Image (cartoon, helix red, strand yellow):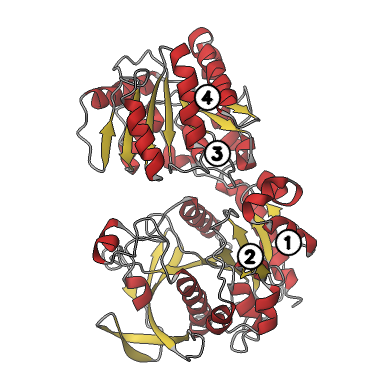
Amino acid sequence: MEVDTGNDRTQVRSVWMVTREYDKLAGAGGVKDVCRQLAETLAASGDCRVRAVLPRYGFMDPAALGFTLAPVGGRSGRIGGRRYEHTFDVDMHYTGEERRETVAVWQADIAGVRIFLVEADRYATKRAVYTYTDEDEQEVAWQRKGGGHYDYFAMNILLQKAALDLMILLGEQADVVHCHDGHAATLPAIMREGSGYRHYFRRSGALVTIHNAGLGYHQEVADLAFARAVTGLPARVIMRGQLNECFDPFIAAADYAILNTVSEQYGWELQQTAEDSRTGWLGHTLLERGVTLAGVTNGIDPAAFDTTVPAALGLAAAYNVGRGDFAGKETCKRSLLATIAANGPWGQVRQYGTLDADPERPLGTFIGRLTSQKGVDILIQALRELLPHAPSLQFVFLGSGSFEFEEELQQLTASDFGRERICFLKGYDAALANKVYASGDFFLIPSRYEPCGLTDYIAQLFGNLPIVHRVGGLVKVIDGETGFSYDENTPAKLAEAMAGALQLYRHHPQMLRTMRMAAVERIQRLHTWEKVMESYLDLYRRAMAMTGET
């Protein structure tokens, strides 16, 4: 492949993304959306060659997805009982054991982005991106459903080394390697310190995006000897890269890469407030080392949620939020309420509780993981306080998560005040999520912390006004203009915010119509990926300048 050897370091011509998620291929959270949408926007600009590298998990059928095997690697080899004509080995030493792992590569061009899937024994056995499944637990008792993969750190390192090796084998020298979250954050150190990498990548900058800095998201490892062996990093790098006595990829990246978070507010909270305690003081530790986290609020592709094309979203009718045409939205609401009243049928969810089929009643909605971080306990208690005083309000939950919260929601649907007013759709289905977004009047996001948040955008595009805890990336919801927000994240304050929204629903519907239109206008003006891309290009240029190469 022809490589651009020009000296203009202000032009970003080649970006490689390393990620564990990519929308429509493998996903578990918002990372998948950011990776795909940013990659495709960069590629569509016409000025940048974009590549993405992620694992080929066991639940993926690469051939069915349009991938073919890439002729990369000098010899044939066997992976998972299958022989591949082109493979290469990646150093993956354990403590006291020198070893290598064989990988092959699948490739496909999707929406202008060349995507590579790393085939390896380590990935082929995984039925989910990050955690064990029911099926895993049934096969091996200690592989508990929802628990993280035991070899998570080795999975991450194999991906990062394979991505670097792949670039060398293809003869591509990326201007920037964009590393997504802790799963790829060790790459900048490996790229700069490994004798097989540092000369080849001397002109390649690195950007690490922290999608979630919360405890449990760093991909840290306490076994420092293992970290040194499998990464191949010098002892001084391992020791300097510690946080709370663990090797922490984000800390290790600080000397070699530009670091950013997915909203300006979240970056500020991590480095200037006690909210950083939720990260184990990652932000403050970085600040002590002279690293200021850049903040770039995630964007969204409005065309992906275009309610004027209902068939693409599985909606019952078309409507146009930006123009204030909501007749079809009422039809969508009637359709969902009728299906709930009939108890389905459902495909991938299980229904608990039911609702009145009257579309005149206000409908609150929640879609997401049932976790403490998402403030589900706060929302449940707020509903307990509000429902006795708001007899017209109905509420639907869609999601799964903590067993404790799942049980509490099931009980709530059968309680005296929740019966026929709260419906819990346990599980997740993307098509059903669209129906819930389209049907809802208000969308609740009482997160304890939220790096950016995409569901507030999505709800707004569906004409479902968000009610949010004013924290992190949720500050982009403007109280009284594009939604509702509150400061103190308590059940009482949330109930108060919901009551205020219900007052407008009853007495000032025109104001809600104006807010819905304003929310879409603001997204189109400030938060599309075309707008956000410019901020990332600035970070890419900073990363390139950090190499010191001209």
Instruction: Name the element at disc 1.
Output: helix
In the picture, the disc for residue 286 is 1
Give the image location of residue 22, x and y in percent: 44, 59
Judge depth for marks 2 and 4 and give the one in front: 2
Chain-order first, disc 2 or disc 3: 2
The residue where tag 3 is placed is 447
Instruction: Name the element at disc 3.
Output: loop
Circles 2 and 4 in contact, beta carbons < 8 Å:
no
Which residue occupies the foreground of this view, 386 or 529? Answer: 386
Instruction: Calculate the distance from the C-alpha at mark 1 to the C-alpha at mark 3.
Output: 24 Å
The residue where tag 2 is placed is 250
Instruction: Calculate the distance from the C-alpha at mark 2 to the C-alpha at mark 3.
Output: 23 Å
Judge depth for marks 4 and 1 and give the one in front: 1
**Residue at x 37%, y 33% (from the top left corner):** 409
Which amino acid, mark 3? Ser
Q: Along the horizontal axis of the image, is 269 left or right of 382?
A: right
Residue 464 seen in render: no
**Residue at x 67%, y 51% (from the top left corner):** 277
Residue 104 seen in render: yes
Which amino acid, mark 2? Phe
Q: Along the horizontal axis of the image, is 16 left or right of 140?
A: right
